[in-house]
Image: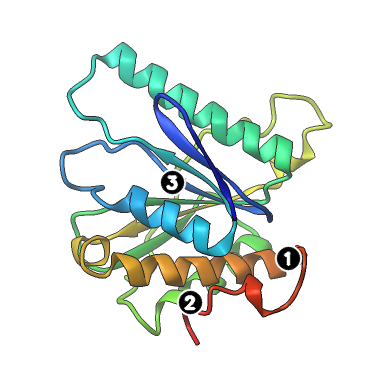
């Protein structure tokens, strides 16, 4: 069973695999409600890594917000480097209905991971058409400024899933189950085999 570690501004779920689920800080009062719950639940179901930002209970100063965001991004960077994370999936909210999937990278591997995510969601949810992703920036991971040995950070795939109001509210448990299954498929694509084997590794949400 994954272990939860509580920090002042976020919670970490220590699991296994090559996928890190990430819930950024809530930036508006209602837009990202329940995204943290979805990320944490999906991580527990899939036994994967996760970083879940805590809800900001009140308005913070600009310096406080920047400090909290910088701490959160450093935690993501540390996970990528320490645990060999190859795919970061950031889940946030959107005012528009449906689900939008975006990628920060390009190339065939990024496209294959996007296909896995869309294929896992489309049978059950309304996935919005692809959007222009030029300039899309989900996380500022330091890919190129830590020397040539930092190949793990350079090769990480960063995906953003934006959930509409309906998906974040009364369909949140179904979303968490689907994301958990998607994590398993991505791990398999990236060459990770779950320790212990057997059917217990599957969340079984799509059975």
- Can residue 2 be seen? yes
- Pick whichever of labels 2 and 3 is earlier in the sequence: 2
- Can residue 141 be seen? no
Q: Nearer the viewer, mark 2 or mark 1?
A: 1
Residue lying at 45% horizontally and 37% vertically, measured from the top left: 11
Residue lying at 59% horizontally and 55% vertically, measured from the top left: 1
Q: From the top left corner, tell me how far across and down residue 203 is, in percent.
A: 54, 73
Whether tag 2 and tag 3 are in contact, CB under 8 A, the answer is: no
Q: Secondary structure at mark 3?
A: loop
Residue holding disc 3: 136
Residue 68, compared with residue 39, is above or below; it is above
Residue lying at 30% horizontally and 76% vertically, measured from the top left: 126
Q: Nearer the viewer, mark 2 or mark 3?
A: 2
Q: CA distance from mark 2 to mark 1?
A: 19 Å
Q: Nearer the viewer, mark 1 or mark 3?
A: 1
Q: CA distance from mark 2 to mark 3?
A: 23 Å
The residue positioned farthest toward the right in the image shown: 149
Residue holding disc 1: 194
Residue 28, compared with residue 107, is above or below; it is above
Q: From the top left corner, tell me how far across and down residue 159 is, in percent.
A: 50, 54
Whether tag 1 and tag 3 are in contact, CB under 8 A, the answer is: no
Q: From the top left corner, tell me how far across and down residue 6 is, in percent.
A: 46, 32
Q: From the top left corner, tell me how far across and down residue 91 is, in percent.
A: 40, 52
Residue holding disc 2: 120
Mark 2 is surrounded, within 10 Å at the Cα level, by few (under 14), some (14 to 19) or many (20 or more) other residues, namely some
Q: Secondary structure at mark 2?
A: helix
């Amino acid at each position: 069973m994954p272990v939860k570690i509580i920090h002042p501004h976020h919670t970490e779920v220590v699991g296994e695999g090559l996928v890190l689920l990430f819930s950024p800080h809530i930036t508006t009062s209602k837009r990202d409600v329940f995204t943290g719950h979805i990320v944490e639940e999906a991580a527990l179901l899939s036994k994967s890594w996760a970083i879940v930002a805590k809800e900001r209970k009140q308005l913070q100063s600009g310096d406080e917000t920047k400090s909290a965001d910088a701490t959160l991004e450093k935690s993501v960077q540390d996970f990528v480097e320490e645990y060999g994370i190859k795919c970061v999936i950031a889940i946030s909210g959107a005012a528009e209905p449906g689900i939008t999937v975006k990628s920060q990278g390009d190339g065939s591997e990024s496209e294959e991971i996007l296909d896995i995510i869309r294929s896992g969601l489309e049978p059950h949810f309304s996935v919005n058409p692809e959007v222009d992703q030029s300039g899309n920036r989900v996380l500022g991971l330091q890919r190129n400024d830590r020397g040539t040995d930092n190949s793990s950070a350079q090769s990480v795939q960063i995906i953003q899933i934006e959930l509409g109001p309906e998906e974040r509210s009364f369909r949140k448990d179904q979303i968490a189950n689907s994301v958990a299954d998607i994590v398993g498929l991505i791990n398999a694509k990236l060459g990770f085999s779950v320790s212990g084997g057997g059917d217990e590794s599957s969340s079984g949400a799509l059975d």
